[in-house]
Image (cartoon, helix red, strand yellow):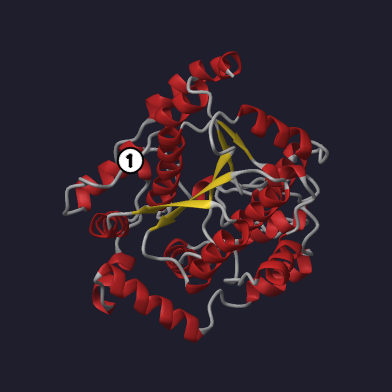
Amino acid sequence: MKICKICVMDETDPDITFDENGVCNHCQNWHANRPRDMGLLRKITHIVKERATGEYDCVLGISGGTDSSYLAYLAYWLNLNVLLVHLNDGWNSDEAKWNVKTIIKKTGYDLVEIQVDEPEFRDIVRAYLHAGVVGLEAPTDNCIMTGIHRVVSGFGINNIISGSNWATEGVGVRAWAYPPADTKNIRAIHERFGSLPLKETKLMGLLQKRWALTFRGVREFRLLNYIDYNRSDAIRILAQNWGWKESGRKHCENRYTRFVEGYIYPTRFGFDKRRSHFSALICSGQMTREEALIELKKPAYTQEEFEADKAFFFEKLGLDEFKFGHFMALPIRQHNEFSTHKWSLRLLRIMRPLRRFFR
């Protein structure tokens, strides 16, 4: 299997391409589109405060993971008055729970906790397992996005600051995920394989999000793109100054995501998301290719950690070895085998120029 000469992306990405030097399109894209001006942080912070219309300057969604935790640390240092939002889907690791409490204690920021309807959420997850589609994280991501925008709307806040960043997330693989804002697809999969009506679960579609960003004047700022963001340094600073606890590899603060990325994706779908995470770190100079290749030879889980997360996964979803084995053996399907919001993309192309006009 061909692998990039610079990063560790390989042909488990079906859409990967290589140039004549063996460098993949992901490396080329990372360097071509990386944010280049690291001196804009103060200016953007001023814009955020200037646009604030009420008690809070902005909203920040926190998971207890490294990126959002460090952004809370940065926002506190920048003297921003932040309203924190946290989605409690019942899958938080102990480290994530500790970190969220620590962030609140150290910053004094207010928190809105979004509680999912656990029976309905479990039913969506089981439906996705039954459907055999790759976008197993889409429902969770949609609930996070929906919760943040509901809080923004409810409090009349103009600004969202996001821990999403190019340095650690600039290598994305379309074939390994599915857009979480396609609510039509989420509902179609659930209607086909779910058993409970979705009465309490709120979902936000792509057009709703774009409407907020275009006509309501809501803006999202990715502040970590305007500093020399280094994940290892962030972990060290948070641990030393706040007593923050690391939960392991990227996205391990959520035990559902940890099990999906650490076991289900490589076992059922044949790809290891660590490749994209490590490749971004290689491109940003935070990891060498040799270090990444050594890490990839190691299993994502120790046996003890795997057994603990599997037992938790089974308990939360009402599964046993037989039922889980049945899900893992089902045919793999594409998301477009179910209804999608393809028509939304056409409308978005029309709306995109309007965003500049209404800002």
Estimate the x, y position of residue 303 in percent, counting from the top left. 49, 85
Binning the other alpha carbons within 10 Å of mark 1 as few (below 14), some (14 to 19) or many (20 upward) gives many
Whether residue 19 is visible, yes or no, is: no
Estimate the x, y position of residue 162 in percent, counting from the top left. 59, 44
- Quarter the C terminus occupies: top right
Q: Where is 240 relative to 201, above or below?
A: below
Q: Residue type at mark 1?
A: Asn
Quadrant of residue 91 within the rendered picture: bottom left
Whether residue 257 is visible, yes or no, is: yes
Q: Nearer the viewer, residue 232 or 328?
A: 232
Q: What residue lies at 54% left-to-right and 15% top-to-bottom? A: 354
Estimate the x, y position of residue 279 in percent, counting from the top left. 69, 57
Q: Is residue 140 toward the left or the right of residue 298 in the image? A: left
Q: Nearer the viewer, residue 161 or 191?
A: 161
Q: Is residue 221 toward the left or the right of residue 167 in the image? A: left
SS assignment at label 1: helix
Estimate the x, y position of residue 172 in percent, counting from the top left. 60, 48
Q: In the rendered image, which residue does mark 1 sit on? A: 185
